[in-house]
Image: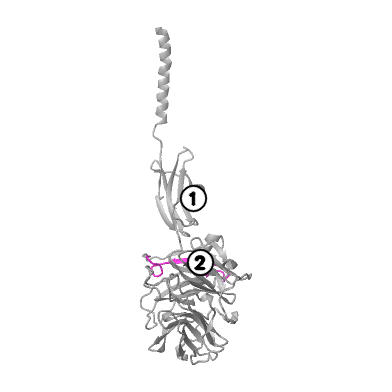
């Protein structure tokens, strides 16, 4: 009995000793990988670049034999569809993920191939829309063969922006579509319309010599194009001359020489304007005036051959036809040219006219009561060689520019007063390529006014944008210059210079 017990005990002791040895080996302390430089949460914008530098250590010591893998979700909350974006400690990733309230998961996995140790850290990436409020700038870097869009945000064009450093989102179209936009952008216009019920649509209209595109305002992918935006317009080419938001729910587009109107409350597509026997070729890129007044939706044009003005009035003006303004202004404008047209003070349509004799005129038309106001300008009240113009809707004032000079004509006490403005670009090689009266993106459409919109900028309707181009450097710039509504002169305050663009061809203010 004793011998049998001894035989049993000895193997059991050996088994216990082996188990203890194995236990000691399995639970001994192993080296640990630590990772710094990856935040738990990150907020960025569509089109912005995420740049991170991770520092990985092994047991607290530098180690040079790690493998790295950065990856990000292609859809928020979906880790089954992920994309590898870097295999180094650094990552530089331009965010092409669609803006979303839910976060995307960015991960970094660090592995040691010798020991098999590995560690993964995660970052929740919230992608906001790059197309918040700011300036949407269309520009070309190859002479108009292709174009792209940059968004400029700063405290003078973006409500709530407090940083002194502007934010640029570059080449948004190429990011979204894989290549730049073909051709030169002649006009760009953000559109946000709603009747509060059925017809709700938000997009960016962009027009070239060939196409009218409706771009998704978050991703800049093409949502609609050409004929899909029109009722009964099926031509192969859509040459865009002008795009305008006016009144409460109206958008006008001048395509292939015809004027088309889009009324939100009907069907959100463009219908040809009622001409009442007027030939469509009377429309030019610079002879259509309009008014910003809510509930007005007034639009008018100058018939250059006849030297007469036609108008449409009322909120649903797309249902009617242009009617002749029978009031006379005491000047023969037949055969003249409309140099510029736009919105004037107190809901009037405004025009700058050069008559057949080379004389210049400021004309204001109020379609509601057919009132015509006319100012004949003396030769000394005009900037010789002026080819760029801007009209103001908060004062009877026009700005004009040549390649190098800027001037204004202001109506003071019923008489035009001309002033050349003491302004020059930063570099003598910069040439002026355009000027524009700044209006905040919401202003002039959607039924918004100062009583219903809670985010007005102090700079709304109070600054002029000057666009320049330097041929030698290939850089376009925007100068933001506040002006005095009484004198037509720039103030001493300077709202900054913003560059890095190609040759600027169109600029529009975007919405919040």
Circle 2 crowding by C-alpha within 10 Å: few under 14, some 14–19, many from 20: many
Between 103 and 92, the one lying in front of the other is 103
Between 29 and 197, the one lying in front of the other is 197
Say above or below: 232 vs 305: above
Q: Position of residue 353 (x, y in %)?
A: 51, 86
> Which corner quadrant holds the N terminus?
top left
Which span is picked out in magenta?
Answer: 137-160
Write down the quadrant of residue 60 in the picture.
Answer: top left
Going from N to C along the chain, the mark reached first, 1 or 2, is: 1
Q: Position of residue 208 (x, y in %)?
A: 57, 71
* Count of marks overlaid on the render: 2
Element type where label 2 sits in the image: strand
Q: Nearer the viewer, mark 1 or mark 2?
A: 2
Q: Which residue is mark 1?
A: 73
Which circle marks residue 204 in the picture? 2
- Can you see residue 146? no
- Can you see residue 369? yes
> Which corner quadrant holds the C terminus?
bottom left
Circle 1 crowding by C-alpha within 10 Å: few under 14, some 14–19, many from 20: many
How far is mark 1 from mark 2, CA to CA?
27 Å
């Amino acid at each position: 009995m004793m011998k049998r017990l001894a035989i049993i005990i000895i193997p059991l002791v050996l088994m216990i000793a082996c188990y203890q040895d194995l236990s000691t080996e399995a639970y001994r302390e192993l080296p640990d990988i630590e990772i710094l430089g990856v935040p738990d949460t990150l907020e960025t914008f569509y089109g912005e670049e995420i740049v991170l530098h991770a520092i990985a250590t092994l047991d607290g010591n530098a180690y040079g034999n790690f493998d790295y893998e950065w990856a990000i979700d292609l859809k928020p909350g979906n880790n089954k569809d992920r994309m590898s974006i870097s295999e180094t400690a650094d990552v530089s990733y331009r965010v092409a993920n669609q803006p979303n309230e839910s976060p995307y998961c960015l991960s970094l996995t660090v592995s040691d191939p010798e020991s098999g140790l590995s560690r993964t850290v995660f970052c929740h990436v919230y992608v906001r829309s790059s197309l918040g409020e700011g300036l949407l700038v269309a520009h070309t870097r190859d002479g108009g063969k292709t174009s792209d869009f940059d968004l400029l945000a700063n405290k003078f064009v973006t409500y709530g922006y407090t940083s002194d450093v502007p934010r640029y989102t570059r080449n948004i179209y190429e990011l979204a579509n894989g290549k730049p936009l073909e051709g030169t952008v002649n006009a760009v216009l953000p559109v946000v319309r709603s009747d509060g019920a059925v017809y709700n649509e938000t997009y960016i209209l962009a027009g070239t010599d060939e196409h009218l595109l409706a771009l998704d305002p978050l991703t800049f992918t093409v949502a609609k194009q050409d004929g899909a935006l029109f009722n009964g317009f099926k031509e192969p080419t859509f040459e865009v001359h002008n795009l305008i938001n006016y009144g409460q729910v109206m958008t006008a587009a001048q395509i292939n020489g015809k004027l088309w109107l889009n009324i939100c409350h009907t069907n959100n597509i463009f219908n040809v304007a009622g001409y009442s026997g007027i030939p469509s070729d009377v429309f030019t890129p610079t002879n259509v005036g309009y008014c910003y007044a809510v509930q007005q939706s007034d639009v008018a044009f100058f018939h250059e051959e006849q030297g007469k003005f036609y108008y449409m009035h009322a909120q649903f003006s797309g249902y009617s036809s242009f009617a002749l303004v029978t009031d006379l202004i005491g000047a023969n404008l037949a055969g003249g040219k409309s140099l510029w047209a736009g919105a004037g003070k107190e809901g009037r349509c405004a025009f700058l006219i050069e008559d057949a004799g080379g004389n210049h005129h400021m004309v204001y038309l109020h379609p509601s009561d057919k009132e015509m106001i006319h100012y004949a300008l003396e030769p000394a009240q005009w900037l010789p060689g002026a080819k760029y113009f801007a009209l103001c809707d908060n004062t009877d004032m026009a700005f004009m520019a040549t390649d190098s000079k800027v001037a204004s004509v202001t109506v003071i006490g019923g008489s035009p007063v001309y002033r050349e403005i003491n302004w020059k670009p930063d570099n003598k090689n910069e040439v002026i390529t355009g000027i524009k009266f700044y209006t905040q993106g919401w202003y002039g459409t959607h039924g918004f006014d100062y009583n219903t919109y809670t985010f007005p900028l102090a700079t709304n309707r109070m600054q002029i944008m000057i666009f320049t181009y330097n041929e030698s450097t290939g850089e376009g710039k925007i100068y933001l210059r506040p002006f005095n509504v009484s004198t037509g002169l720039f103030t001493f305050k300077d709202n900054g210079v913003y560059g890095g663009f190609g040759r600027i061809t169109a600029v529009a203010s975007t919405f919040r």
